[in-house]
Amino acid sequence: MNEAIALEGLERRYGDRPALRGVSISVAEGQTLAVFGANGAGKTTLLRVLATLLRPHAGSVSILGASLPGEAWKVRGRVGFLGHEPLVYPDLTPRENLRFHARLHGVAAARVEELLGAVGLERRAGDPVRELSRGMVQRLAVARAVLHDPAVLLLDEPRAGLDPAAAEELEPLIGRASGRTRVLVTHDVERGLGEADAVLGLRAGAAELAGGRAAAAEVRRLYS
């Protein structure tokens, strides 16, 4: 398998405070990396570096063969990011939001309608986002993240705000069945392990644990 993501000695700081310290791991194409750690451990910072939203201060970062930050332009259109914030405009409708992002990525309008159906928002597609429930906004955020059919998905607690039925409905888009390379940040240890091909545990920005599925027992000990 080819490497989709490769980190070697990654460092990122906020002022003098280190957020990531010497993080190294690789993820093959089509595999899922589950990232564990307490609040403030550096998980979201890692996703934002991979999403090209933050620049690394040291070490090397490669996504789909492109080196960050110098070649970030090569991969921005091939990465989907689903973070804590939905990154949608509250005064626009779901359809308007997706059409806006479709224009940015050169995606056909038919894809917008396809995804509105896939996430179950057809009936509310013309209502302002500010009138939608938290779960509906999360559905829209999922549609935005996969609109351009990214090869790599960066997921920060992707099932937050979703009931079990909604979470199951979105699995073809963001779950293992999507076939995409995924980096999954989660506090749900058992579900994360069930989806993972590799695991990374962070503590105060450093890699406390990095390895394959064989590390499951250690993950449970450290993060359950």
Image (tube, helix red, strand yellow):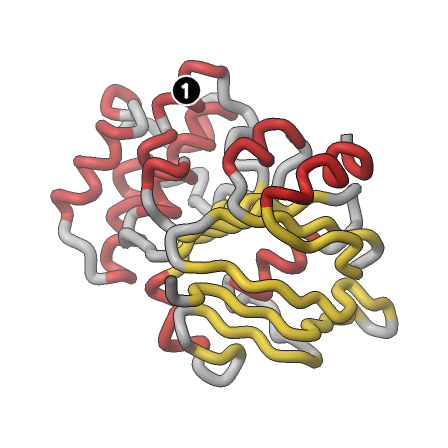
Residue 51 higher or lower than 175, as above or below = below
The picture places residue 125, in percent across and down from the top left corner, at 27, 29
The quarter of the image holding the C terminus is: top right
Please state which of residues 207 and 132 is positioned toward the viewer in this rendering: 207
Please state which of residues 91 and 61 is positioned toward the viewer in this rendering: 61
Residue 67 higher or lower than 37, as above or below = below
Mark 1 residue type: Ala
Residue 70 higher or lower than 27, as above or below = below
Please state which of residues 107 and 28 is positioned toward the viewer in this rendering: 28
Residue 192 higher or lower than 203, as above or below = above
Residue 39 appears in which quarter of the rendering?
Answer: top right
- In the image, farthest residue toward the bottom: 70
The reply, left or right, for residue 198 in relation to residue 106 is right
The reply, left or right, for residue 116 in relation to residue 218 is left
Residue 170 appears in which quarter of the rendering?
Answer: top left
Residue 85 appears in which quarter of the rendering?
Answer: top right
Q: Residues within 10 Å of mark 1 (few under 14, many from 20)?
A: some
The picture places residue 7, in percent across and down from the top left corner, at 60, 70
The quarter of the image holding the N terminus is: bottom left
The residue under the point 73% across, 55% down is 42
The residue under the point 55% across, 66% down is 53
The picture places residue 60, in percent across and down from the top left corner, at 60, 79
The residue under the point 39% across, 77% down is 73
The reply, left or right, for residue 14 in relation to residue 55 is right
The picture places residue 108, in percent across and down from the top left corner, at 14, 52
Quickly name the residue at label 1: 166
Q: Secondary structure at mark 1?
A: helix
The residue under the point 76% across, 40% down is 218
The tally of labels here is: 1
